[in-house]
Image (tube, helix red, strand yellow):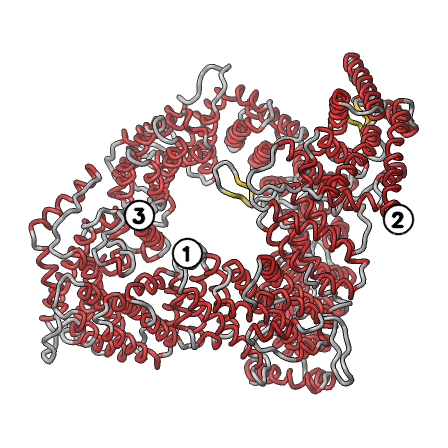
Amino acid sequence: MAGKRRNRSSSHSSAASSEAPKKKASSSVTTPKSSSKRRKKQNSETSSFHADGITPSVSQETSASASASASNHDEIVSHITKFLSATKSSSNEKESSDLSSVISYLIQVLQKNTTAVDDEHGTCTSLAGMYITKEDVATLLLPWSVSRLMRLAAAASANDENSTNNTGDELDALAWAALSSSLDIIATATPLTATATATATATAETSTSQVSTSNETLLSSCFPQSTLNRLVPYAGRIAFFSSSSQPPSKPTYNIQKSASNTFVHLVRRYKSSFDVVCKTLLSDVDALVPNSNNHKIDNGTTTTTRLPHEVAVVRATLQKIHGLMESANPKRLFTIVCSTDVLPRLGRLSMVMSSSEADDMEGKLIQKILWDGLFHPVHHMDGFRTMSEMKTVPKVEAAEVVAAAALDQDGGKQTEGKKGSNKTCFQAGLFHSVRTLLLSSIPTSVDDTGEEDIIAAAKLLPTVVHGFFERVREHAMRSKNGRSTTEADAKLQFRFWCHLILPVLETMFNRKQQDGNKEVDDALLDAISQTLGLVLQYDAYLPSYNDPDEEHLTYLQSVANGLVRCVDFSNSRTKTDHDQYALVTSLCNLILLNHRLVHSHLSTVTRYACSCLPQKNQEPNKLLFTIVKTYRELRAIGDFLTATREAFIKTSSRERADKMNNILLCNSVVDSLALAYQSCPSGQLQEMWNFFDGWIADSISKPPELSFAVQMFIIFVKSIRSDKQNSLSLRGLCELSMNSSIAKLLDRSDAESIHMRLGFDLCGWLVELHSRSCFWIDNISVDGESSFLLTTSKEDTNRLNVLTYLHNAAETVVTSESFSFWKKSFLGAYWQSGKVDTQIDIGVHSSLRGSLQRLALHRIHQLHSMIYYCNLEESENDSKDAQSTMLTREATMLVDFSFYIACSEAIGASGSNSEQEDLTLPSDSLWIPIAQSLPIWSHYCEHFHSELFLIWFYTSISSARNSSHTSRREYATSLALTRDASFYDNDKIMSPLMHVGIKFAMHKSNEDVEISSKALAFISSAPVQLVECSDSTGIVTDILDLDIQTVSLSQSQNGQVVKQLLCSTRSILARVLSVAMVPSGFDTSLFTKMTQHLLSSSSDDIGCDMSYLAASSDAINESLSLCIDYYEKKDTLLRDFFSQLSNLIDDDPSSEIPLSKSFLLRGVIRKLNTLNRHHSLAKRSVTRNKSVYDICTERVLDIHERTWSRLFSKISEAHSSSCIELLLASELLSFHSNCPMKNKEAKEHTTELFEKVDAIQDSSPEADMVTACNYFVSVMADAPDYLFGCVAQEKVFEHVLDAMSLSPTSPVDTPLLDAAFCSLIRHTNVDGLDTAIKILIEKEDEGQNSVFLIKTFHLIISSIKSQEKQKYIAGYCEHFLLISMDLLREKACDDHKAKYNVGLFSRMMTTLLARKELLLMSGREIGMICSEMTPLFHIDRVNARDVECDISVFHSCSSVVSALIAHYSKQLYGCPSPLFGLLLSLLSHTLHTNAKKGLSEKALEYSKLCELLIPHKDIFKKHVVGLILCYIKALSEGMSPITKKKLMPSIYALLDVCSDFETRQINAMIDVPSKTLFAPVFKSYQKFYQYHGQA
């Protein structure tokens, strides 16, 4: 019967569907009512448009367009008629083909999105003004497509075949497209085409359906629940591609896309319960998604990227599930979500969709489903708190036992056992489901489905744990006024994690013994790693928490032991990046939780972390750094060293160097070790020193371990901090190592062995530490103790005499003929060809060069100290003078030796590698030690060494892109030098710095322009004294030659790099000319040539870049200054300069002045204006009776006459390209305004240009043009009398105020206009001031904002000085005082505007308070000011500000309070309440501020205010009590130590205001706990602050 009813219902539905098109078609062809209504409304809107004078776009169409629209209408009607007749008749092959073409045309009509006018609903659109709408067409196609697809779904279900086998017919594909397009038109508020499916589904959750009643009726009739039950799953199956070998073809892809869009629309209408949706839709999607997991592409590789329509189906399903959760029963909801069916499905979807390239919306939806379904704050969380499982901590047992016990349980339902048994909460079902899923793989025969469920469940566990932790925190924040979780909450979180992760741990540790599936192992490790990270993040476990029986520690110890076993297992097989990442992260989190967890396995963990290096991810590096940092903070770094040595024992000899040496490659680990040694207690130094000595002695026959031990010992020696307390012991330890470790390494066995190299390396650093220690020791004997370390004692003759060996090696090298030839020819050969011979026979084996060089440099350091002591004693003993000379000679020899070794490798090369250096770190450059010891050897160097070092310096700092390890190290070293201030104080290096740099840049410009640009960029920005007087012309010549050479390269090299190089050269030239002192008798042709070159090259096509023009202009201006400075002696320089400058201007008045020439002319005249303001143009020539000013005036007048007409015509265009011309015209007129003899023509030009600028200002110009106009007004306002003589005073003020009011709405200062306005106010009379005020009042009446009004009035009162002006302006002060209060009342503004408004209010108030002659305030005004500032510190307004804005507001208000107390203290006596109300708000705000939000700044400001109250203690003492009580209340509620410390000066000042009566009053008003907390504060006040003496 059920089947018959279903068939009958289906046939009835088909009949109804076949009738629907007839009715709809007829109503569409005739005059539908809905269309009639739309036409009426459209006609009414059109008439209203015409009534308003607005012509709609439709009425503007041509008659041809109207004819085309009519033909389109007839074509649509024809196709609709064909569709109706085709659907009536029996189908055959011809009619089927005709029907396909008809439906294709109608679908194209639906998918059109052009020539559309929206109707009143915004969904039905008329086509080019026709009568048939898209909604009509969609209504016609919808029933047909539903009927056909239902038949396909029934056939697919009956045949039990894959749905893709039924999509071969063309009509079937058209049915999907028709249904998708029809639903886009009918079912949504916004028309969505089939191509916008992905976009539509992305906003499906937030879009609101606004379908009409008729559309809703149609959708309800076409899609009853029975239809949806068939069609929705079928659409989902079609949307997914079933084949995993080939990507879908284009027709199939279009079908899938249409089916996906249909699924998205229909699933919103799917009316069912939450559990049914999970059993049907979620199950179907879970089964479909893996079928399209991998698609092979052309190159044979596979990709897991999800197609947009597949993502849309999954997203719509998850949205539907989440939407139904709100109406579901909470208990039933929890049971379904945590069931063994739903959890794996969600986990699989999470894994599959996370690999897609789409956004993470699916992951967020799954998180919402889990969090809302399992941890609802009202329905679920209390049950977790009362669970018996949360009272205890479980133990990690064998997986088989736990699995058997878990599978015997009932399943987590709420049952009640026998009498006296405990109730089980339904929340326990979560733990049971996880156990069932994870422990199902314990039997030996495990199918793929079981392992897939394990992976899926493990994937969700971090999300589940995160949700529980977050809900507990939210509950704590709601119940504790925003404070963090308590210890009880943390225990709840930790025990939840223990029970939930327990099956994971047992499964993981048991599977390691069985060598299970790798993917399962990775999933379980991921779950452990991520959940441990959550435990750490949420402070669910802290060692300080109460743990009487150490249950929590025992559980974590079990986790740590299991992970260490995983480490051993991982070492026995091939490791993957994923395996390493999860395991290393877990170990790192365990160490951060409690170092005791891995302390007993520290050597194993260290060895594993080293074996994972180097990797792309930084987790192994982070693990090693965490270990070192933890033991450094525990002052137990020796435990880490012991573990590192034990790691060598556990590793085979072949792997030792490869693995353990990776520690030395981690810069963060080495730096942390160095910091640990620096902060190491003095009592541990000898213990660690003996440890290294013993390690070296025990590993003397094991080269890999020996090399590592020596390197670690060197790090220790380098990092020890020597001081007066430990210097004696350190010196003794150095001597001890020389007799033990060094004696065994330097055993004379083989001069080329690794032992010799390591011995010299270690010996060099021992010498360095010994020298640092001797610095703190008094009464040093130069002959004995300083050199004793390197010599051989009489008792120990077997040890190599290091000093003798070094001295003999250096002397042999330095006295050789090859060295002499090298020193004479090296620099010449380098500057000539850039290539020098590095294959030189130094006489030292290549493996020992770096070690001996480092030893020689440290010996120079030791000699430097010895020479210092010799110089102190040379006056007492003449032999000391001879010894000092001998030591200096030795130091000079060692400098030669060190540089000779450094030059054995090419400058900038990747370094030399010896045959045995593969056992240690990659070799560093031989230049790095020289750079690091620069402050010492530079005392004994020659000019040759300085120049050679600078060549390396410029080479390394200019080659940062070199990929070699050594070059990057060299670049980092040279960069560190540039950031060291002592580098610029080294005279021997700074003297040739510029000369060598310019020579280097010129040398490299032909090879690599970029290298030259970088070198010159450093010179131009270096904070050095550039040149000496005697070398100024030589430097200028070198720079000029380089500039000329660079200009010639502009055609053949990269133009941008050449411009950068030219910018640097001309910046350097400007700096040199600004400080250069030209000697007498200098050659003037040099500067003539320089000026000519700068003017000619800057005006070429290359000079279109503004930065290049700016640098050129600076150089030309400095050249002009130099010509003016030497005008008295060489007046021809200035004349030649102006002569060449005049050549820039073409005499043809019709030609346009190029931008580059206008820029340079403007720079020169601006320089003249600057010098004229400083009265620097008054010099006169010895031979001519003309001053500089006379010559400049003549030349500027000539330039003015030759350029003005062209400038003015260019300015008239009023666009951004004419900004430079306007600036040039401004400078010309500014020069004339300061002339004693005013030019009538210049005045006329000023009037014309002012009117032009005024017109430009009113035409809304571009930003650059606005700045140029403001500049013109500012420079002309510098001569207000001249400006008022050219333009009416009222017009000038009106223009300036209009320009200020037209500034951007955001609070941006206009300094040019502000300066101009202040200048005009200062030089005007009372009438002019009256004009400005009247304009300002008019602006207020026009509704101008208060920011502009108060800013302008503040400029006025700050600028006036005369009594007449003050008397006039005093009548307006009270009016603008009231307006200024509006600045504080604007709540809805951004941080920048709020900061500006309050700052402007503060400046206005402090000015008015300080100038009582303008306004004498009464208590009413003072109370109003304080009351208006108090709301600024309400909690809602404070939370809306960022840190910078909040500090600024606090500082501004404090400034106003300070001004009030300083200027109106007597008036405050009568109204103290508003003042102390504001002070109370400031104190409360400071108490609620932490260190990251400006606590120090606010506390400092508040302490200043409190100290201002002390002189008025007699009046204010009774009001201070409230402030102190507020502080005491904050103490009782809990105050951080840093807040208490920062506020202590303020409280001391407040207590100093109080008398004994107020002190007793405070004592009586607080309770006993508060007294206990405040007593130490009061005692410290009495001890450190209160004055007990006599005045």
| Residue 972 at x, y percent in the picture | 35, 53
Which one is in front, 178 or 828? 178
Alpha-carbon span between mark 3 and mark 2:
91 Å
Q: In the displayed structure, does residue 1293 sit left or right of residue 755?
A: right
Work out whether residue 799 can be spotted. Answer: yes
Mark 1 neighbour density, 10 Å: few (under 14) some (14–19) many (20 or more): few
Which one is in front, 5 or 43? 5
Provide the residue designation for mark 3.
Answer: 956
Label 1: element kind: loop
Give, as a three-letter code, the residue at label 2: Met
Give, as a three-letter code, the residue at label 1: Gln
Residue at left offset 89%, top offset 35%: 16
Provide the residue designation for mark 2.
Answer: 1
Provide the residue designation for mark 1.
Answer: 615
Discs 1/2, front: 2
Q: Return the disc, 3 or 2, that comes first in the chain's sequence.
A: 2
Q: In the displayed structure, does residue 1231 sit left or right of residue 409?
A: left
Residue at left offset 18%, top offset 67%: 867
Q: Return the disc, 1 or 2, that comes first in the chain's sequence.
A: 2
Label 2: element kind: loop
Q: To which quarter of the image does residue 1276 belong?
A: top right
> Residues at badges 3 and 2 in contact (C-beta under 8 Å)?
no
